[in-house]
């Protein structure tokens, strides 16, 4: 038996198969995951760093209550927007859910696009040095004075690999990367490569979805349009009215940060909408860089007219339903 690092979770990891379905934001991975879950009798682990927050529904494209009643989803709505949420906490909650699904005899589909969560869940969590609160306070003070872009530039100077995959607005991860570098003298991107030789968690299979850039951008524009029509501005306004208000991490989510700028009077709505599109494309670019690490993935090149049902048909026909299940 192997210890997961999750309190109360002690299981024979390699006997549990987890099929990851990932791709850039808005590529169609969640739709495919739902179709496969229904056909295979599977349950879904959400691998999304923003779907964990309650009441952040529209901007995260969270599955509806009706969908979640039909198809069990896990690690969604597990944190308040006002609080912080760590990768370690995600691994803990996901591990508990995976064990429970396995005990029910159902396949496990891990669906989402947060590459760090995929990496941590499939290859073990890089712990690194303990937090240095004094150092963190100094870094955050510099960010407050000069902006997170300045810290991102500092990170790029010492760890260009990490800077490439961390968004300039993601202050929490920028601070952690700079903290690790200062405490260890090593780039966090280099230290995290130890995961490649420490696969001690689950029997993992990976399905990656990708689209041509023009198609991906078209879908991004349509996605943003639908979010606005669904009431994204009202959702953000309600979040800002909460006491306590959303944390820095929640406020920096793509779609939320830009609307917060608009509601603060800094930019008109039309400009905020364009910024969402731009930042979503930048996020997708960062995701593509991360996903190159998953060399063992079975990649599916989607066409503009590809449907989740059609892709599921091909996958099940080529691989067979048993491919998604652990050996009996």
Image: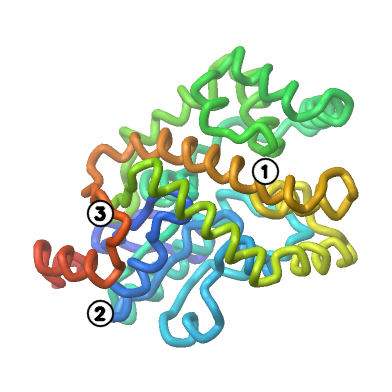
> Taking 241 as reference, is 72 left or right?
left
Q: Which residue is rendered at x = 85% and y = 55% of the image? A: 263
Report the mark closest to the observer, 1 or 2.
Answer: 1
Is residue 53 positioned above or below 260 on the image?
below
Q: Which residue is mark 3?
A: 205
Residue 1 visible in image: no
Of the image marks 2 and 3, the number of the one nearer the N terminus: 2
Q: Which residue is mark 1?
A: 275
Q: Which residue is mark 2?
A: 39
Tell me where residue 241 sits by quadrant.
bottom right
Label 3: which secondary element? strand
Is residue 64 positioned above or below 291 on the image?
below
The residue carrying pointer 2 sits among few (fewer than 14), some (14 to 19) or many (20 or more) residues within 10 Å by Cα, namely few
Report the mark closest to the observer, 2 or 3.
Answer: 2
Q: Nearer the viewer, residue 72 or 217?
A: 217
* Residue 307: image location, x then y, percent: 29, 67
Residue found at the far front of this picture: 270
Q: Which residue is rendered at x = 39% and y = 50% of the image? A: 23
Label 2: which secondary element? helix
Give yes or no for contact between labels 1 and 2 (Cβ–Cβ under 8 Å).
no
Of the image marks 1 and 2, the number of the one nearer the N terminus: 2
* Residue 321: image location, x then y, percent: 15, 72
* Residue 288: image location, x then y, percent: 41, 38
> Taking 35 as reference, is 175 left or right?
right
Label 1: which secondary element? helix
Is residue 11 positioned above or below 36 on the image?
above
* Residue 286: image location, x then y, percent: 49, 36
Identify the image quadrant of the C terminus.
bottom left
């Amino acid at each position: 038996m192997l210890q997961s690092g999750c309190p109360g979770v002690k299981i024979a990891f390699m006997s549990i198969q987890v099929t990851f379905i990932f791709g850039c934001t808005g590529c169609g991975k969640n739709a495919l995951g739902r179709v496969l879950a229904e056909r295979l009798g599977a349950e879904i682990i959400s691998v999304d760093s923003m779907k964990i927050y309650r009441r952040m529904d529209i901007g995260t494209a969270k599955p509806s209550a009706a969908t979640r009643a039909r198809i069990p989803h896990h690690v969604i709505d597990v944190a308040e927007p006002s609080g912080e949420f760590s990768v370690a906490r995600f691994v803990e909650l996901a591990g508990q859910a995976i064990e429970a699904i396995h005990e029910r005899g159902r396949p496990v589909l891990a669906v989402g696009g947060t590459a760090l969560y995929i990496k941590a869940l499939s290859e073990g969590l890089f712990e690194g040095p303990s937090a240095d609160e004094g150092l963190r306070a100094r870094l955050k003070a510099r960010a407050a004075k000069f902006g997170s872009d300045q810290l991102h530039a500092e990170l790029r100077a010492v760890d260009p690999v990490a800077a490439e995959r961390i968004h300039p607005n993601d202050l929490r991860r920028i601070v952690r990367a700079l903290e690790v570098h200062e405490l260890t003298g090593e780039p966090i991107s280099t230290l995290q490569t130890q995961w490649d030789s420490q696969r001690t968690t689950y029997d993992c299979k990976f399905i990656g979805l990708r689209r041509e850039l023009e198609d991906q951008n078209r879908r991004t524009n349509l996605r943003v349009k639908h979010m606005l029509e669904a009431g994204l501005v009202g959702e953000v306004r309600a979040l800002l009215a909460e006491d306590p208000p959303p944390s820095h991490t929640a406020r920096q989510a793509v779609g939320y940060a830009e609307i917060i700028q608009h509601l603060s009077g800094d930019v008109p709505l039309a400009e905020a909408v364009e910024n969402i599109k731009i930042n979503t494309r930048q996020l997708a670019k960062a995701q593509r860089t991360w996903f190159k690490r998953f060399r063992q993935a079975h990649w599916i090149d989607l066409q503009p007219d590809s449907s989740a049902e059609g892709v599921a048909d091909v996958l099940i026909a080529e691989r067979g339903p048993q491919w998604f299940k652990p050996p009996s």
